[in-house]
Structures are given as structure tokens and as C-alpha cells.
Image (cartoon, rainbow, N blue to C red):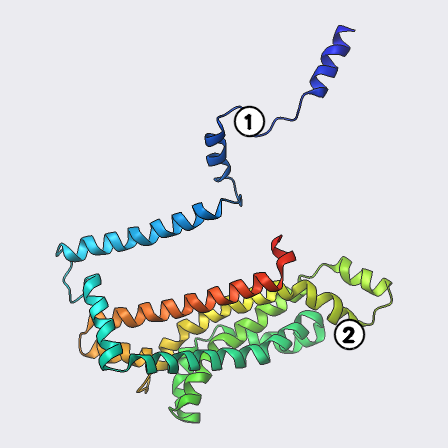
Amino acid sequence: MEKVAKSEEIVSQPPIIPYQSERNGSRKSRKWLLPQAEIPRKLYVGISVVSIVLLFAIWSLITYSGMVDPLFLPTPTKIIKSGAALFMEQGFISDIWITIYRVLAGFLIAVLIGLPLGVFMGTFKVVEAFFEPIISAIRYMPASAFIPLFILWIGVGELEKITIIFVGTFFSLVLMVSVEVGNVRRELLEAAYTLGRSKFDVVRSVILPASMPGIMETIRLILGWAWSYIIVAELVASASGIGSLILESQRMLNTGNIIFGIVTIGVLGLLSDLILKIGIRKAFPWHYGR
């Protein structure tokens, strides 16, 4: 009877929760260090702000103290003055708009063509067998290597710059979308066929809904690549755009303008990424557990 009582006592005890014996504060702090564990939103924002402040603090320390020659790395004050001069004296806002136009034009054309092609490659093996070898081979060719050919074929106008953005994003986009579509669980397809769905109904009602969150995340990632290729597109035979300004500033040894142009591209890319991120999470709340 005593053994039975002890066993019942053990069974009746609540399950042991990790760190239950520790203080609440210590338990919570350690929980935040668990792999993929969520942390409070305020803490996340606070850590992000601290990282940015720390970066500016280090920058200020090595520039205002004279540890680095201003020719190589100007002070934050110098960068701000350079940016103000660009906007007020050199019409920098027009360079920003033309750069945004080139990035979005090349990127949207790549999405309009690459998205359906990637879906078909991920869905039908016969389509994948036809396109995958060619696209995989071209994907490893740097877009900058095509610039001489583009200049020879289509000149040095806007189309050439948009084409560089397109080539730099299209082939990787197709393959990544294809992989995302191909990763849809086989059980979902079999269930749809069991319910009498046709193959095109399966694509419309199963494959696309299941893969669309991942596809949109892929598009968001590729948009970042488009912003990186704009420098390549605008450094060659361009009289406008942020890349052209950076090249001209390099010839004049104006490091302040160079850094401000680079930071501007980074801010524009970050804003576009945030817009896509918010849109994706609102469009597919179920995918993110909301």
C-alpha cells in the first residue's frame, strides 16, 4: 500500500517545466535564449535601437577623435552636410526617383515572367526538365558580365539599365519559386485527387495557396538583390541615378557624397523590404500564427 501511495503521489505531481525552480526573471531571460524562442516586442525593438546607437557611437569615436583621415571616413556631421547639399544644390531627389524607377521596373518584369514560369517548373517535371538546365547555367553568370553585350545590343539608355536588374534577379527568382512550389506536401495533392479535383484545380486550390507565403518571401528576398544590382546598372554610361552620383563623387574624392549615396540606397531597400514584409504578414496571417 505504501508503494502504491508513493506511485500515486509521483503521478499526481505536475510535469516539471524547464527552469521552474529558478526565479521568474532568470527563467524568462534564459527562455529568450532558447532556439527560435519568441521575445517581447519591446525588447526586440530596444535591442535593435541599441545596435544602431552602438554603430554610430563607434563611428563617431573613430572620426571625431581623428583616428581616421576624413578623406577615407568623414564624420557623421560631414555626411549630413553632404546630404543636405545634395538635396538643395544638386537635385538629388530626381536621382532617387530615377533609381527607384529602374529597380522597380526591372524587378516587376522579372516577377511577372519568372513567377508563373517558376510555378510551372515546380508543378510539372516536364517543364522543369526543359528550362532548369538553361536557367541554372545562366544563374551563375554575373549580370555585370553582360553589360558589354547589353550596350552593344540595346545601347546605354534606360532599357539597358532595366535589363541588368532583370537579368540579375530573374533566373534566381525562377529557381527559388520552383523549389518552393515543389516542396508542397504530397499528402495535400493526394487528398485533392481523392476528392475528384482535376490537375489544374490542384494547382489553383492546393499548390498555389500552400506555396504562396513562401513565394512572397522569395520575392521579398529577390527585391533586395535588385537594389544591389542598381549600382552595377548605373555605374556604366549613366548621367543620372544614385549610382552615377557615387561614381562622380569618387572621381572628385568626395567621400561624404559616396557614403550618403550608399546609405540612401540602403534606406530605400529597407523601406521596400518593410513594406513587403508587412503586406505579406497581413495577407497570410495564418502562416505566421496570427
Q: Determine whether the residue tagged by mark 2 lies in a helix, strand or loop.
A: helix
Q: In the image shown, does 140 or 177 lie closer to the viewer?
A: 177
Quadrant for the N terminus in the image = top right
Which mark is first along the chain, 1 or 2? 1
Q: Can residue 63 be seen in this view?
A: yes
Q: Mark 2 points at which residue?
A: 200
Quarter residue 146 falls in:
bottom left
Mark carried by residue 168? none
Label 1 amino acid?
Gln
- Please indicate whether residue 59 sits to the left or right of residue 221 in the image: left
Q: Is residue 164 above or below residue 4?
A: below
Instruction: Identify the residue at image location x=57%, y=64%.
Output: 280
Q: Mark 1 points at which residue?
A: 20
Q: In this view, does 216 lie above or below 171?
A: above
Instruction: Identify the residue at image location x=45%, y=84%.
Output: 162
Binning the other alpha carbons within 10 Å of mark 1 as few (below 14), some (14 to 19) or many (20 upward) gives few
Image location of residue 226, percent across then percent down: 45, 74
Q: Is residue 30 above or below residue 218?
A: above
Image location of residue 60, percent across then percent down: 21, 55
